């Protein structure tokens, strides 16, 4: 079949004289797709990315890092470390007079963050949407507990016990356990 009946302006040919068949989107179709994608991103984007979820997850990760650091600090310094769970967050304190016998309960020495030696290892910016509960196996609540140099964990009365921490919030719902014999957080 010969395409000579088409005017030369309509018959597109390559360098060898073969007819080419062009298929493409029009400019109007491309603009409409971009507009629809913009509307979809504007409506659904904020549902996937909110600051609340990042703040909640950061707080939980910082809390877990503080627990693990408290355990290591007590083992390395051979001194008890106090972990306080507060309504606004948490803080780490270390026994000021470790070498005293009998042991002192003066937890006035602030544990410093390893990445920022000038700032205390505490976080008082708990998101309002996050609820933290801590329960030990020996009593009802454990808002204050201690990491011993041997790796053990005790509650405020000095009894070794497993501690269960539960985080609940808009984007976070997790539980972690601190083993009484090793201080392992999982």
Image: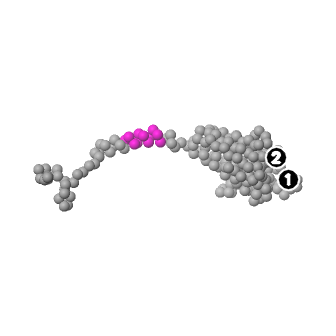
Above-or-below relation of 98 to 136: below
Q: Residue at x 66, y 39 (%)?
A: 131
Dot 1 or dot 2, earlier in sequence: 1
- In this rendering, which labeled residue sits more in front, label 1 or label 2? 2
Query: Residue 114, image x and y in percent?
Result: 68, 57
Residue 159: image tag: 2
Residue 68 on image: x %, y %: 70, 53
**Boundaries of the magenta span:** 35-45
Q: Looking at the rendering, which quadrant does residue 79 occupy?
A: bottom right
Binning the other alpha carbons within 10 Å of mark 2 as few (below 14), some (14 to 19) or many (20 upward) gives: some
Q: Position of residue 96 (x, y in %)?
A: 80, 54
Q: Looking at the magenta stretch, what is its main secondary structure?
A: helix
Residue 89 in magenta stretch: no
Q: Is residue 179 visible?
A: yes
Quadrant in which residue 37 is drawn: top left
The quarter of the picture where residue 33 lies is top left
Residue on which the image places disc 1: 103
- Position of 51 with respect to 151 (left or right) is left
Residue at the spot x=46%, y=40% of the render?
44
Q: Is residue 160 above or below residue 129?
A: below
């Amino acid at each position: 079949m010969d395409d000579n009946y088409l005017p030369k302006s309509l018959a597109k040919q390559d360098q060898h004289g073969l007819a080419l068949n062009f298929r493409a989107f029009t400019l109007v179709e491309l603009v409409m797709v971009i507009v629809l994608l913009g509307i979809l991103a504007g409506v659904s984007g904020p549902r996937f990315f909110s600051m609340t979820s990042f703040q909640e997850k950061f707080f939980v990760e910082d809390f877990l890092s503080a627990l693990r650091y408290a355990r290591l600090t007590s083992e390395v310094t051979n001194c008890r470390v106090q972990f306080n769970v507060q309504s606004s967050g948490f803080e780490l304190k270390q026994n000021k007079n470790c070498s005293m016998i009998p042991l002192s309960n003066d937890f006035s020495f602030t544990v410093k963050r390893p990445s920022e030696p000038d700032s205390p290892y505490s976080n008082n910016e708990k998101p309002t949407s996050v609820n933290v509960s801590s329960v030990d196996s020996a009593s009802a609540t454990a808002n204050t507990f201690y990491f011993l140099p041997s790796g053990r964990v005790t509650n405020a009365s000095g009894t070794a016990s497993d501690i269960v921490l539960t985080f609940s919030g808009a984007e976070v719902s997790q539980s972690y356990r601190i083993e009484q014999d090793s201080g392992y957080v999982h």
